Image (cartoon, rainbow, N blue to C red):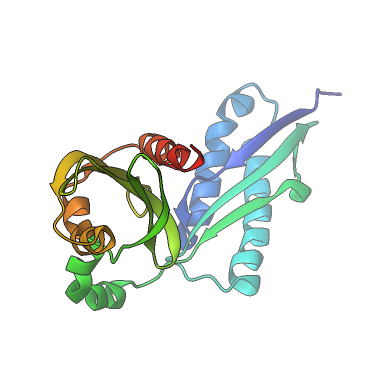
Amino acid sequence: MSQLVTNQLTTGLVITGAYADKVRKTLFAQLKDNIKKGEVVSQEVARAIAELNKVLYYIFVEKLKLDKGDVVRVRIEYTIENGKIKWKYENLQIEVFKRQDVSSIISEIIPEIEKLIIPNYVIERISTTILGDYIYRIKLNDKDVGRIVLTKIDEELGILHGAIIEPSPLLINKRKVTIKEDIDKFLSENLSNFISSAQNVEVTEAEKVIKSIDALVSK
């Protein structure tokens, strides 16, 4: 009695119309050495391939109603014992990625590209410290996505910096600004300018700045 061997077949990403060929090529490639050693014959490999492909066809076509252009990935373990291949269907895993024509969506957003590049951020004051820090949260579609703080130096000058994490992490580097009006109004009207010149950074760097600004509130 030969030793029980367990292996896994993984198709990788493949269009539904080509899964059967991918299963055949993958299994024959995996068992090339086994066939040479006489542990399994090519006819048995072909039989196992046909069996699995029948099951997958039923799932893809009859149950999931997939189109040939949809993308799937199949993983399944199998054993080889006494020259026979047995699929472990209880461990069968299938991922499905539906093909979708997005050309109409692209056409719709083209007139909105400028707005998408600089989203409609709004600010909401969180706190004002005794040291003259005016701290704001930055919101996008009612979601909290960043912080900005303006620290007054005198009646007209201040230092401003902040960070945003969505939709792209940005760092608003420290800069001196001249304030000739209400601070809330000044920041609201100039926020897009500050963001347009912000620096692209890693998410962790933006989060670090946000945490440091939040720490000012607790102080």
Picture residue at 45% right of the left edge, 38% below the top: 211
Q: Position of residue 21 (x, y in %)?
A: 49, 52
Task: Answer with the quarter of the image where residue 87 lies.
Answer: top right
Q: Is residue 11 above or below residue 100?
A: above
Counting the numbered discs, the total is 0
Does residue 66 appear left or right of residue 119 in this picture?
Answer: right
Closer to the camera, 57 or 152?
152
Q: Position of residue 196 (x, y in %)?
A: 18, 53
Q: Position of residue 84 (x, y in %)?
A: 76, 38
**Quadrant of the snapshot with the N terminus:** top right
Does residue 9 appear left or right of residue 189 in this picture?
Answer: right
Q: Determine if residue 170 is in view.
A: no
Closer to the camera, 155 or 78?
155
Does residue 187 appear left or right of residue 95 in this picture?
Answer: left
Q: Position of residue 139 (x, y in %)?
A: 39, 60
Task: Answer with the quarter of the image where residue 154 lies.
Answer: top left
Picture residue at 72% right of the left edge, 39% below the top: 78
Picture residue at 78% right of the left edge, 49% below the top: 90
Q: Is residue 138 above or below residue 58?
A: above
Q: Determine if residue 72 is in view.
A: yes
Picture residue at 35% right of the left edge, 55% below the top: 167
Closer to the camera, 61 or 42?
61
